[in-house]
Image (cartoon, rainbow, N blue to C red):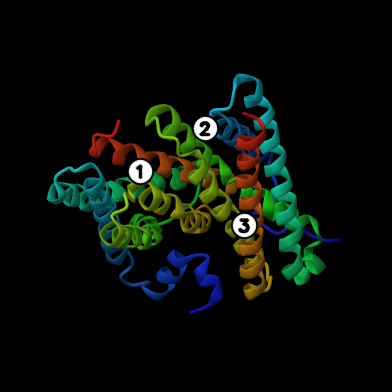
Amino acid sequence: MRISNLFNPAEFLKEKLEGNLSLTGFLLSGLAFALFFLQTALDSGSPVVLSLAKGALFGTIGIAIAGYIIWQTVKMAGNQVALVPVMGAVALSYSSTLVFALVGLLLHFSLGWNTAISCGITGVLSAFGPMSGVIAGLTGEKRTLNIFIVTFTGVYVLLFWALLNNIV
Amino acid sequence: MEQTPAGFKTDFIRIILLFTAIYVLSKLTSASLGLGPDYTNTYAIIIMMAIAAGIIITTILLALPNSVVIKTYGFTVIMKAVTNGFAFLFPFAMMAILSDYIFKWNAVQPIASAAIFTCVSVSASDLMKLGGKKAGNLIFSFTASIVFLLMYMGCGILANTFLK
């Protein structure tokens, strides 16, 4: 593993899993959001199984929809890329969210801390770095478009997380 | 003559996004501390100055492991990489607005901390793509993030001590 991979785990995974990118990406993002929603349920006292299911669905279908919107935007900006790899790459960006979710759950079960915000939201925010690298590759270094796409994805994830967990 | 590599040209919209993000994060950080109305604007200006100083320090620190890049493209490419990296403050500023005004959370400080780490690492990874030293960029970007974060947090501690 190269040192540069520490900056961008999604790119590292993309290189290693070129053939199974989409499936691996959705498995990772599904698991990441299932655990993130589980943290929220543990903190708020909501039903755990329902939250896990909602998280897994959002991590797969919800992120696939975000990937589709990003693909359409990138296409409208004049960059021809295939749909499935874009969806897979976007989903794969949430690999760091999975790490934060696991750390959050470990802290919750060992020390009893509420970690949905401190680890969960931080995990979602940490996906911005890898995602910017992935999207820069898709947009052909159109940096301003890249910033707007990352902003859209962040707002989309945070809003749906809040709506699905009755936080708003 | 030195050439600007593709994707490193600084455009006007990105500069506007950067300044908007700095303004939003400064105002929200200032409001989150619950200082009196007389001090809120003063503290917002202090935070803006701290962020500007943090960006300058990041530029200097990231120049150290990228002597090869400077030799090829000139020092301006470091400034452009840092400006482009910190334009990524904008998505975080939007998250901070969302959390503050819609969710009613007081989460601007953790969001700003995550923003600082992400923006510095985006700048460093851009410079690595141009041929900068990988280990050097990792070490100096981490150092720059810590220094930046200490300045940002330090301003909050000082404001809580002296401005209340």
**Dot 3 surroundings within 10 Å: few (below 14), some, or many (20 or more)?**
many
Disc 3 to disc 1, C-alpha distance:
26 Å
- Is residue B16 visible from the viewing direction of this image? no
Q: Residue at x 54, y 54 (%)?
A: B118
- Give the numbered dot on residue A157: 1
Disc 1 to disc 2, C-alpha distance:
24 Å
Q: In front: B70, or B44?
A: B44
Q: Mark 3 points at which residue?
A: B145
| Horizontal side of residue A117 vs A7, given as left or right | left
- Image location of residue A45, percent across then percent down: 19, 43
- Image location of residue B116, percent across then percent down: 58, 50
Does the residue at mark 3 contact the one at mark 1 (Cβ under 8 Å)? no
- Image location of residue B150, percent across then percent down: 63, 52
**Which residue type carries mark 2?**
Ser
- The subunit letter for the residue under badge 2 reads B
Answer above or below: position of B156 versus B54.
above
Are the residues under marks 3 and 1 on the same chain? Answer: no
Secondary structure under tag 2 reads: helix
Are the residues under marks 1 and 2 on the same chain? Answer: no
Secondary structure under tag 1 reads: helix
Are the residues under marks 3 and 2 on the same chain? Answer: yes
- Give the numbered dot on residue B32: 2
Foreground label between 3 and 2: 2
Q: In front: A23, or B124?
A: B124
Q: Which quarter of the figure has residue A105? A: bottom left
**Which residue type carries mark 1?**
Val
Q: Which quarter of the figure has residue A25? A: bottom left
- Image location of residue B135, percent across then percent down: 63, 75
Foreground label between 3 and 1: 3
| Horizontal side of residue B87 vs A97, given as left or right | right
Answer above or below: position of B19 versus B84.
above
- Give the numbered dot on residue A90: none
